[in-house]
Amino acid sequence: MENMMMKLKKLTVALTITLMSTTILSSLNLAVAAPSARELMEAVNARDDGNNGLMEMEMILIDKKGKQRIRKLKKMSQDRGDDSYSLLFFLSPSDVKDTGFLTYDYDQSGKDDDQWLYLPALKKTKRIANDDKSGSFMGSDFNYSDMSDPDLDDYNFTLMKETKVHGNEVWQIKSVPKSKEIIEETGYRQSVVFVRKDNFVVVRAVRWMESKGKLRYLDLKKLEQIDGVWTPLETTMTTKEGKRTLHKTVIRYSKVRYNQELDESLFTVRRLEKGAN
Amino acid sequence: MKLFLPVLLLTSTLIPVAAEEIGSSDLLIDDALGGFDSEESVDNLLGGFDENGFEEGEFGSSVESELSLPENSVSAIRGHWVTGSSWNIAGSSPTADRLTRLSTKLWLESEQDLGGGWKLHGDGFLRYDLAYSINGRNQYTGGVVDGYEQDAEIGEFWVRGSLTPDLDLKVGRQVVVWGQSDYLRVNDVLNPLDLREPGLVDIETLRRPIGMLKTDYYQGDWRWSALLISENRPNLSAPCGSEYSLAGVVTQASCDSSAVPVELSDDGLSDAEYALSAMGRFSGWDLSLYAGRLNYDTPYKDAAGANNVMRNARVSHLGAAINIAEGSWLWKGELALVDGLRYFNTGAAKKSRFDLLLGGEYRGITNSTLSFEVLRRHINGYESSLTNSTDFQDESSWQSVLGYTRDLRNDTIHLKGVILRNGNIFNDGGYLRLSTKYDLRDQWSVTGGGIWYDATKYRPDWSDNDRLFIEARRDF
């Protein structure tokens, strides 16, 4: 956490200096290096996204006819060094209540995550081995790759332009996977992301799906600073083919709290098998 | 058309490879996008957002009032109701009527927090099958009507809590799953099974809960468990006269003449089972070790006395299981040595059996899982008479399973296929089960499918039991 904060501070200072220099030097009509898209994405990844967090999550899946399915979940998360631990429980619907998912997300490049799934109907905890992040996250329009920070070394970034989203100044950045493997792993051929200049939050993104002709639109509808952490409270992801909406997911977070005294023993299979309560 | 498809497949494979070879994934993408770099076309695509406004809260604004989840969204009592039917579709049905099930089942469960981290859980179900009254009960044996027409059962009923920060206690009827395999059982031997309709039993009621005292001690990456099992419930086997029984569909008189008294292990401490297990979970792999003194759930016909009697053998079980995750593969291995097995044709001799399972699960295909498991069982000190009735055991036997699941249309459609084959070259019968589940709403789903059996070398012969099934489920 401290490392992340330090990185973020350094990047923010560097970017501020670069931007100030750009302004000053531009006015002097001298050539100067603008912040690179890569540096901006490093700032996005280094942004403080909270530690020892507790929250509830409502996921609304809406099909093209407007029919809704609602999943409610409880999430706990903890950073240990550069690694992230999380525990997720279904609260509803009834048939999946107490289904739990424990993830140890390692920062080390090449090291696979440890994941266990507890299935109450089977009374069994299953280890999940899954490098492929292109699958749908619990039936939603989010892929698993949307739920974690990308490895920046896997992409080429281009700063397209500066614009405004919801009245806020943003950088518009194009992100292209360097290899076919990354496309297959994430399910996206490329993305355009909109990064807010004041807090490095990605407030919008367009993702070109591996399945040609389909696009995904991520839109952050509600953002709030909680315990000093910029927290997306409502996000939609819409899958479209041309102008036609195929499916849409709304994710809302509530009861968000950071810096809770979460014991390390919470993030264990023992706790996973005991359910949400 | 016949030529077109292979050409299309070939070219669709070659194009990305060619692009990769020239080292430019950008080229591939840009080609596919048809001019993404054009600002105008990009802006057109970027205009696909729904403009429903944006809210940004400031410090201290109340978010919870707007977004908090409804309290008690799931009630204290929950469960499901299932109504379903199945029909025999084999070429020649062993029964006069093709309707094999028209049942409705109500499953209820409840959990109560007792305070201090202790929890009370209870569940159970009621089931009634109208097929027997529709077809006419008199065409079935008494055992079939008693065994299949209705159920009323208390399932799990337990209290759980922590005695110390590292020690948990769970007392009561419960299910404990040993092993890592999903389809074939090597170490998953603690709970008896419902085997009345193999391949068709609901997952919630497949394992029969048994009364036990279980303690779990946690130390670092390890969990050490000790179990004292005082309740002895038998496997629920197909009764005499059932399509799934050893003798197949026979008359009541035939069942009466071949009936063998049953003297299964008693409840209480005299025949209690004892077991220990250790499970370590590490980065990338899990390891489990098992040991138990158990009553073997499949009874043998004991011919030692004046009359034949069905009994449970008292066996010692030693086993181990391992999981290794590697990319999108999960490799599984299990082994077990079961000592003290008894058979009808070998009198008082006790035999041991060595079971070895290898398997894998691949999740590298989007929204899909592909699994396989291969199991070899070997009876030590084998005697050729074991091939005779009613043992029907080869010295070595093989079972293999291939399973495939796929979720479609945002997890509303779930496809599942399982092929189970016996024999070292898959040549000794088995079954194929295919099913599709469709989630109509959050609480409603329908499932339809079929199961097709192949005859095995030994009885029972299920080859005329092929079925189609359909069911509707409402969760609450």
Image (cartoon, rainbow, N blue to C red):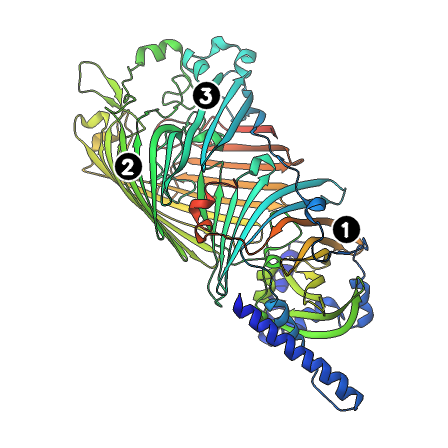
* Picture quadrant where residue B250 is located: top left
Cα distance between the residues tagged 2 and 1: 56 Å
Which of the chains bears the disc numbered 3?
B
Label 2 residue SS? strand
Which of the chains bears the disc numbered 1?
A
Label 1 residue SS? strand
Q: In screen coordinates, is A65 left or right of B347?
A: right
Label 3 residue SS? strand
Q: Which mark is residue B387?
A: none
Q: Which mark is residue B275?
A: 2
The residue that label 3 is drawn on is B153
Please tell me which of labels 2 and 3 falls first in the chain.
3
Residue B418 position, x and y percent, is 49, 40
- Residue at the spot 59% in from the left edge and 32% down from the top edge: B448
**Which residue type carries mark 1?**
Thr
Cα distance between the residues tagged 2 and 3: 26 Å
> Closer to the camera, A75 or B281?
A75
> Closer to the camera, A72 or B139?
A72
Cα distance between the residues tagged 1 and 3: 48 Å
